[in-house]
Amino acid sequence: PPTNQKTRSFQNSSAGIENLNKTLISIKKDNHKVNKLTMLIDDDINYDQISHVIDGVSLIGESEEPIFRDGKQIKELFPKIVFGSIIL
């Protein structure tokens, strides 16, 4: 596992997904080359909810300040998403 691995939780709501997106944008600004994200999903989350989260973790909103790397604008946050589930 990565040495700088961090775990965060966000509410399953529009505000929670917006907070998730803003958090990931700040992470992306410091980690331009990273393109993979691992999501742990609770069993009670349905596909519609997951699809909103996927948008929140993979796309930079048009209203957000653009991120540039080597003079080119980055339009995707983390396009490679690994899904997982915790079974206790």
Image (spheres, grey):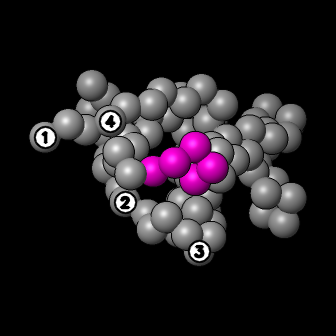
Horizontal and vertical percent position of residue 87: 20, 37
Residue 88 got which mark?
1
**Which callout, 1 or 3, points at the residue further toward the start of the chain?**
3
Q: Are marks 1 and 2 in contact (CB under 8 Å)?
A: no
**Which callout, 2 or 4, points at the residue further toward the start of the chain?**
2
The amino acid sitting under disc 3 is Ala
Residue positioned most to the left? 88
Q: Which residue is mark 3?
A: 15
Q: Is residue 25 visible?
A: no
Q: CA distance from mark 3 to mark 4?
A: 23 Å
Q: Residue at x 59, y 74 (%)?
A: 15
What crowding class fits label 2: few (fewer than 14 Cα within 10 Å), some (14-19), or many (20 or more)?
few
Left or right relative to 8: residue 29: right
**Which callout, 3 or 2, points at the residue further toward the start of the chain?**
2
Horizontal and vertical percent position of residue 81: 55, 30
Q: Is residue 74 magenta?
A: no
Q: Which residue is mark 2?
A: 9
Q: Residue at x 38, y 51 (%)?
A: 44
Please state which of the two labelled residues, at mark 1 or mark 3, is closer to the viewer. 1
Horizontal and vertical percent position of residue 30: 55, 46
Left or right relative to 25: residue 9: left
What crowding class fits label 3: few (fewer than 14 Cα within 10 Å), some (14-19), or many (20 or more)?
few
Residue 85 got which mark?
4
Horizontal and vertical percent position of residue 11: 45, 68
What crowding class fits label 4: few (fewer than 14 Cα within 10 Å), some (14-19), or many (20 or more)?
few
